[in-house]
Amino acid sequence: MFANLKKKITSASLLPQVPFLFLYLLMFFFHLTYAVFNDDAFYIAARGFVDASVLHLVDMTVSGYKTWGTPFLSYFSVLFCIREPWLWQVLDSFFLSLLAIVISRIFTRNNHRIYNWIVVLLILVYPFRHMATAGWISTTVPYVWTLAFGVYSTLFIKKVWDGEEILWFEYPYYVFSLVYGASSPQMSLVLIFVYGLFTFLFIKNHKAKRFLLFQDTLLILSFLSLLLSPGTNSRFVTELRWFPNYLMLSLVDKIELGYSSTLSHFICQPDMIFFLFTLLLWVVVWHKHKEMTARIISAIPFACCLIFGVSTSPPIFGVIPAIRNAVPHGSYGAITVENYFTFSSYFPIFIFGIVAICIILSLYLAFSDARSWLSIYIMVVGFVSRMILAFSPTIWASSTRTFIFLYFAFIICILLLFQELIEKESRYTTILFCILLSISLLSYSSLYY
């Protein structure tokens, strides 16, 4: 009897769905520690909000769209979840698990259990504290939920590409997921890049579907609704209080600010996702190529990550502190009026550029098939999703939550790199998996402190 029970438990633990259940339980336990602050506290403190009817919440949502340009679906979800936090605890944990499921479904060649564990562990490494910058509910719903829905909507593209059958009841899910995902300006931009690329490829290969064109139309309309919202202009004017001199920046200044603030976030401070990405990139290229040039190119991002981000070594002629502090929070970027004519002020820009170029070249070298271009495209789209904040005066006020789309671009690429090592039966796979496991457990544990 006990032998049969043990056998059933062992068999159940080997199911590919177990990692996702594990992720859900871990995140749900953490969500039980939910604390109210920032925007969440603001809404709760509003008179009559706790007892507000659904119709009142709808009125608040419509008013927010007209006066602040807030997306209807995500804003209503925020208001409803703040009123009913237990629902947020259940759903937010679910959407994080859904995100893991869909990423594994789209980017792995089979539903192997090890890939599911890798995705789950990588999501646990993500600095989830970033999702509390405006209050837990006020941040996770517009970012985590839109990301989950947006990625789920691309599952349709994956199925068409692989020639899989799409059942009739799946279409409404893809429609709703696209509309909800596109309610975020950053996710809307990501979806435009994704749907735009694959629409072009499908038309080129004579595989275009009417439903894909319908999704394209919905995506464009959703983006226009954000762009032409009656509250967009008034919101922009109000947000200038967070960056009073923003209108003085030229187009070049804004591009440099977006470029330097995005790259310095990963290169100039300890970041475990970037550490794992550069480490995997170096190991995969080292394992695959014997040429010293390829190995050096792949080692540069990892070396810079250690020297300027992770390392606490003493300063080397002031170079390391100069690069680490090149883009302080709230600044105008690495290049300002004060240091415009100082040659050394351009050195951090040069370092950031070298790292970015080496990452692109290393991704190309890491794979022998279409995954080279796919991984590069994913990284470019992720970078643009954060870069676009340079055209908003909230680039600093929005804090670290706006990096989530770029973080998940790194996560997807790490998954692809792990997949390459596993397929090549590299001896480094077990060591790297143990490193990932250790970092993920430490990262999750840190959420409680």
Image (spheres, rainbow, N blue to C red):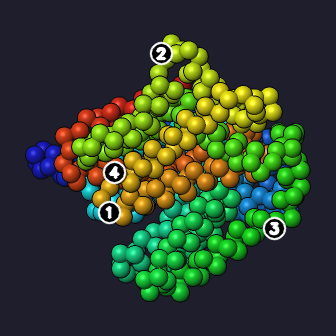
Residue under pointer 4? 366
- Choose mark 4 or mark 3, whichever is in front: 4
- Left/right of residue 27 with respect to residue 322 in the rendered view: left
Q: CA distance from mark 1 to mark 2?
A: 39 Å
The three-letter amino acid code for the residue at tag 1 is Asp
* Disc 2 + disc 3, Cβ < 8 Å: no
Residue under pointer 2? 313
The three-letter amino acid code for the residue at tag 4 is Ala
Under circle 3, the secondary element is loop
Residue under pointer 3? 228
- Choose mark 2 or mark 3, whichever is in front: 2
Residue 335 bears which disc, if any?
none
Q: Earlier in the sequence, mark 4 or mark 3?
A: 3
Q: CA distance from mark 4 to mark 1?
A: 9 Å
Q: Residue at x 21, y 51 (%)?
A: 424
Q: Residues within 10 Å of mark 1 (few under 14, many from 20)?
A: few
Residue 25: quarter of image:
top left
Under circle 1, the secondary element is loop
- Left/right of residue 146 with respect to residue 287 in the rendered view: right
Q: Earlier in the sequence, mark 2 or mark 4?
A: 2
Q: Earlier in the sequence, mark 1 or mark 2?
A: 2
Q: Residue at x 64, y 39 (%)?
A: 260
* Disc 2 + disc 4, Cβ < 8 Å: no
Quadrant of the snapshot with the C terminus? top right
Task: Give x and y (percent) for residue 419.
Answer: 30, 52
Q: Nearer the viewer, residue 180 or 299?
A: 299
